[in-house]
């Protein structure tokens, strides 16, 4: 019993020493000008105000995807617009991600084919300056043009599409593909690029017309119209926004 009482007394003395040390630290912290509870609330309020102010600032529009020619690096891999970003939606299933071989065939053969397998269209978003970057638009904002000539209008985002008939895709028919038609789910490791997540293009009109997007690219505002139909121009992406040059 005496031993228990002795142990209790020792613990009480130790606890008193710890409390004294904590009190000493609190005094030192106060002398150094540590924020009091009221000032912490004020700081939090100021931080909140800055955030609110930031949210009140106009967000970039989809039209900001266009940059001056002088700002565009010769290598698209150095272009901030084409840097890998994140998946803003779940990764695509393996049966919706075309194999890299088929993607490259589409980019290379879109113009030079016979028009029966790979077809070139334009997906147009007029008045892109009215739609915030990084947000989905109404489906009607993205207009499918059954042709390959862009308007090159100011404030207009135009994507050049290389498509296949849905009936060919469903049967996995392609005379340009000698390997797998689709990508393996495990190999889908490259995320979409920044440009894709900024534009979030809606390909619904393409699907409704009986086609599937294989690859696409942004038509730059400075492009020479004589080069529009050259599929070796620009940075090509698959329909999930992954840059072909990043895929192996």
Image (cartoon, grey):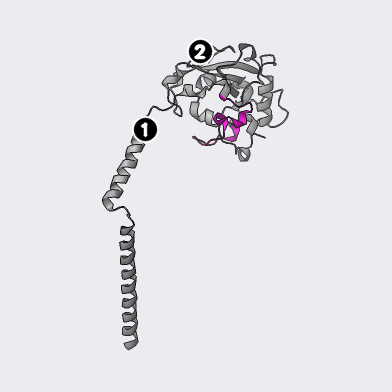
Say whether residue 241 is visible. no
Placement of 158 over or under 47, stated as above or below: above
Q: Position of residue 200 (x, y in %)?
A: 49, 27
Q: Which mark is residue 55?
A: 1
Q: Position of residue 30 (x, y in %)?
A: 31, 58
Pointer 1 or 2: first along the chain? 1
Badge 2 element? loop
Q: Residue at x 53, y 35 (%)?
A: 85
Q: Nearer the viewer, residue 202 or 55?
A: 55
The reply, left or right, for residue 32 in relation to residue 215 is left
Q: In the rendering, at what x and y percent does residue 110 appear?
A: 66, 18
Which of the numbered marks, if any, corresponds to residue 66? none
Q: Does residue 54 show up?
A: yes
Quarter of the rendering containing residue 191: top right
Q: Give the magenta-colored segment's residue range.
A: 71-95
Residue sitting at 50 percent across and 22 percent down?
204
Quadrant of image for the N terminus = bottom left
Q: Residue furthest left?
A: 38
Is 11 covered by the magenta stretch?
no
Q: Crowdedness of circle 2 by 10 Å Cα count: few (<14), some, many (20+)?
A: few
Residue occupied by mark 2:
153
Callout 1 environment at 10 Å: few (<14), some (14 to 19), or many (20+)? Answer: few
């Amino acid at each position: 019993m005496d031993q228990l009482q002795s142990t209790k007394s020792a613990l009480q003395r130790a606890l008193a020493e710890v409390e004294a040390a904590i009190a000493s630290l609190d005094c030192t912290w106060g002398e150094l000008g540590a924020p009091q509870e009221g000032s912490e609330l004020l700081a939090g309020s100021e931080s909140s105000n800055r955030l609110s102010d930031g949210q009140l600032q106009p967000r970039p529009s989809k039209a900001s995807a266009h940059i001056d020619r002088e700002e565009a690096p010769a290598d698209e891999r150095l272009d901030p617009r084409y840097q890998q970003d994140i998946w803003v939606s779940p990764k695509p299933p393996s049966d919706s991600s075309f194999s890299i071989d088929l993607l490259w065939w589409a980019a290379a053969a879109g113009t030079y084919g016979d028009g029966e397998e790979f077809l070139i269209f334009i997906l147009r978003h007029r008045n892109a300056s009215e739609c915030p970057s990084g947000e989905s638009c109404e489906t009607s904002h993205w207009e499918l043009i059954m042709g390959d000539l862009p308007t090159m209008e100011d404030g207009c985002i135009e994507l050049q599409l290389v498509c296949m008939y849905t009936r060919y895709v469903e049967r996995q028919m392609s005379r340009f593909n000698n390997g797998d038609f689709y990508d393996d789910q495990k190999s889908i490791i490259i995320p979409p690029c920044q440009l894709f997540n900024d534009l979030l293009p809606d390909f619904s009109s393409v699907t409704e017309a009986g086609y599937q997007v294989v690859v696409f690219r942004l038509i730059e505002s400075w492009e020479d119209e004589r080069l529009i139909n050259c599929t070796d121009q620009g940075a090509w992406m698959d329909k999930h926004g992954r840059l072909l040059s990043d895929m192996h």
